[in-house]
Amino acid sequence: MKPLYMATILPITLIALSVNQAFAQAENNIKNSSENIDETIVVTATRYQQDVNKIPGAITVITESEIAKQTRVNDDLTSVLANLVPSMTPSRQKLSNQGENLRGRTALILVDGVPQNNPLRNGNRYGYPLDSSTLERIEVVNGASAVHGMGATGGLINYITLSAKKGDNFKQKLGLRINDSFNSDSTSTKMWYNLRHYDEKFDIVGAASWYDQGLYYDAKDNAIGMNSIQGETQDSSATNFFIKTGINFADQRLEFSTNHYELENKNHYVPIKGDFNKGIVGTVAKGTNPGEAISNKVESYNLKYSHDDVANGGLTVQFFYQQFDAIYGQAYWLPTPSVIRDQGTITSTKKGMKLSYNQIELLGLDDSWVFGLDVLKDSTQQYLLGTGLAVTPVMSYSGISPFVQGDILISEDLRLTGGLRHESTTVDVNNAQTLYSFGLYNEEGNPHGRVNTIGGEQDFSELVYNLGAVYRLSDEANVFIGFNQGFGLPDIGRVLRGNWIGDKGQAVDSNINIDFNTMPAVKPVVTDNFEIGVNYTNDQWQLAASAYYSLAKDGANLSLNDGGSYDVVRQRTEITGAEVSAKYQWNEQLSLAALYSTVNGEVDSNANGEVDSDMDLKNVSPDRLMLSVNYDLTDNLSSAIQLNTLFDTENKAKNQKFSGYSLVDASMGFGLQEYGKLTFAIENLLNKNYVGYFSQIRNHSSYYFAGRGRNYSINYEVNF
């Protein structure tokens, strides 16, 4: 276990030192930059537009230019988040985002406010809902939140899509990117196009992209192994089509958008499993995997109506539909006594409505309020393509959640915030049977028969709330303290599918059934997040730092069983941590950035009400430090270099050990005036040979992969 002071006290000390340093630099620096750091407006935190300095919590906003800088090096959204969001688990560089968490808990992924997570069966495929070329910014709320409903026990990640702005007169952008490590089949090519047009009555955005990825290679020029079950982004082809159009009339607006994203494996290679115990990483060989190609498909439709003058307030109504389909590779399922392997798929349909009414100055205290109602309907099932047998029953989720959120200026320097949300949810499960291998088995782990799943309905009702205060120290600095609750469900589908035969903890009993109606494991998870922090912004500095404590009295964690598979375990979970991020504009040419995060999680392993063991490292991120330098040599010549360091960590009880590593990325851009911009980038500049975080702590040869070695890219963009 990490000592408590390492997780909390030390970072708080760093916070204080950083603030003092910020004040000193701001006062003593003679040459101030003429380019100020703009104050950012955040929408997702409170469901209404609000300045960052009014929010009692840690916020990360990744702008369109920052997304572009990251994707020129590695066009992977999970890598962008891992690089720029404190306490985000390192990217796996795979299609599966299993183990990629925020502050040790699940983050709710949204696209324009529409939830992407599957609340009933987490297939770990929600990390790629759209292509990066459709994004205007990414807003991240670090820490538990209930303002967007179910699932944000670790925080919110809201992908904001492109929109047309004043001045966009059929503005078009065309882009081409080529990545290569100069090995066999390592070339990746991406092309994208978008169009934006705006006038007072009508606006439209259209975007399309095609991304063909080759093989990934490690620092020793060996092809990186593939997970032929969970899925890969290497050796794949992805397409994305997006359109958003709006009509403005008087104080009203009607907006429609749709996005279609599909990624499919090209199936040119078969995996060669490594050996975790001997330190031999997996690789690939030419060949074709049996069955259908592994794929991800996300189709969404979004209709929004807004009226800016309804009883001196603003009304917004949003209707959405999302269809998610994921196909996994063939695996050892043993669905019947005579069939050993089959191919899994998860399908999920979401329909919903979000209604909100914003009002300001109700009390005449520079106050802002939002009143609203969220409705969500989700239907999910996991089944096998070959036999057609159900892995989980058909499950449906219905939620109705009224809420209110507001902030009030109590005095010249003190602002209070607070909100209530009532979560009323119903989960319905159909009658079914488990697969042969997930039913009864003997003490040696041999299958012995299927088990009936008794369906039914469970209702859950929970009132969650948040409170906070922001105190202004000066025009540049404020401190905050906040309490937020998050509401989420465990992976109900994983519980209902039964026990895998590799877990030998249950003896044969012909009377065993899985009765959904009496299962305590499916009860919701309520997470309490306490946080204290400081923000400082002036013409040169942008500093944010916070320390937090997160408690789930009845958490739902994934824990390795004896057979090497993960089960849902309900146990008390406590997480402490701290985050520091800073940006400094030295002058017009030079800017610096840094972030540091530390996370420590503990669980109650013996159900006595007290935490006593370190959390499985799959659920938390290692301590990390990121440093970056951006230098514009001339108006048309820019450069950037970024260092990411992950520090060693260990969980002796789980036999998990992570040896940290440092990676350096660099890029240089050349402005070509009206002919566009050309950028050269190198990922893993020093060609560091390393094994990824998840691979090191998973303790399984099938997941043991090296990370990407040195990789070159050339990027060209032109606006016309």
Image (cartoon, grey):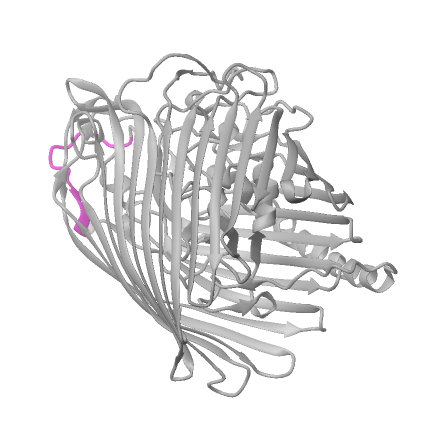
Secondary structure mostly taken by the magenta-highlighted segment of the chain: loop
Q: In this view, does 242 lie above or below 332?
A: below
Q: In this view, does 607 lie above or below 47?
A: above
The reply to whether the magenta stretch includes residue 509 is: yes
Question: Total of numbered circles in the picture?
Answer: 0
Res 687 seen here: yes
Is 491 in front, or is 1? 491
**Left or right of 257 on screen, residue 385:** left
User: Quarter of the image holding residue 183?
Assistant: top right
| Residue 493 place in picture, x, y as percent | 26, 42
Residue under the point 70% across and 43% down: 628
Is 478 in front, or is 364? 364
Res 86 seen here: no
Residue under the point 49% across and 32% down: 190
**Left or right of 307 on screen, residue 523:** left
| Residue 540 place in picture, x, y as percent | 75, 59
The reply to whether the magenta stretch includes residue 327 is: no
- Outermost residue toward the top? 286
Q: Is residue 196 above or below residue 146?
A: above
Q: Looking at the figure, which quarter contains the N terminus? A: top right
Instruction: Provide the residue span drawn in magenta.
Output: 505-517
User: Quarter of the image holding residue 621?
Assistant: top right
| Residue 301 place in picture, x, y as percent | 31, 52
Residue under the point 79% across and 58% down: 33
User: Quarter of the image holding residue 269?
Assistant: top left
Is 297 in front, or is 18? 297
